Image (cartoon, helix red, strand yellow):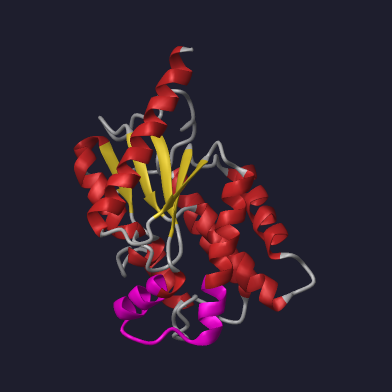
Amino acid sequence: MTNAVLPRPRLGSGGADRPLWVSVEGVNGVGKTTSVRAVAAAFGPRCLRLDELTDQRADSLPGQVIAALAATGDVCLRTGHPVAETLALLALKFRESERLAAGLQDGVEVVLEDRGVDSVAVCQAAILHAESPATPALAIAERILATVRRWRTMPDATVLLVGDTDVCTARFAARIGRVVPPDAQAVIEHTGRLYRQLAAAEPDRYTLIDVSGHGPEESAKAVEDAVRAAEARREAARVA
């Protein structure tokens, strides 16, 4: 496994020979990070793992931006300025994409991303919808993704992990060491519904995996199988 020390920005990162980009999405506590780390380790040096923005080094640019957004103590990174928050998070994801280019990481065949632009879209759509209820949350998420597509390509494949909401929330609360307040829990639940709606709208890109009742190893194996299936589909398309 190669843990991301990203190369300098370079244009021209598209093309059939670039690594397969797979994002793993889902609500807090569903087991994304544990699965991503296990799958990246199983793939070894041919996999570049991109950590979730909230898990990146405190002294990095993403770490500093996340620290600013988290300064109020809100678990959903709400500062009272949802449009600015959305733009800041998108800018970090654009920067991440721009700093990856085919050929700069020898032997990397798969980029495995722990939460990508879809997470920004659904999480911020849920928050923005609470500020402007007249605009459907799904329409906001789709608008955010339309902005993304103007600036970068979408992941080749997206794996969505879904599970029991109460279990996920309890895991998340245990991880952060405090109770998730009702308003934040409402945002997380809304985010979960939006993920499913996006998955239904893009079945060719999304693979939905229900991990209810699964242990970490079983969840990781399901994600690994989904990534290998995406590799197989891409190879079949190349030779067709």
Asked whether, in this view, residue 185 is left or right of residue 38, the answer is: right
Instruction: Residue 78 in the image: state x and y as whole percent.
Output: 54, 78
Residue farthest along the front direction in this orientation = 213
Residue 28 appears at what percent x and percent y?
A: 42, 68
| Residue 37 within the segment the image draws in magenta | no
Q: Does the magenta stretch include residue 173?
A: yes
Q: In which quarter of the image is the N terminus?
A: top left
Name the residue located 44 percent from the left edge and 85 percent from the top edge: 73
Which residue is at the far right?
Answer: 134
Q: Can residue 58 be seen in this view?
A: yes
Q: Can residue 101 be seen in this view?
A: no
- Among the 4 quarters of the image, the one containing residue 194: bottom right
Q: In this view, does 48 lie to the left or right of 13?
A: left
**Residue for point 49% across, 75% down:** 76
Query: Which residue is rendered at x = 30% and y = 76% of the image?
Result: 175
x, y percent for residue 230: 41, 33
Q: What stretch is highlighted in magenta?
A: 167-188
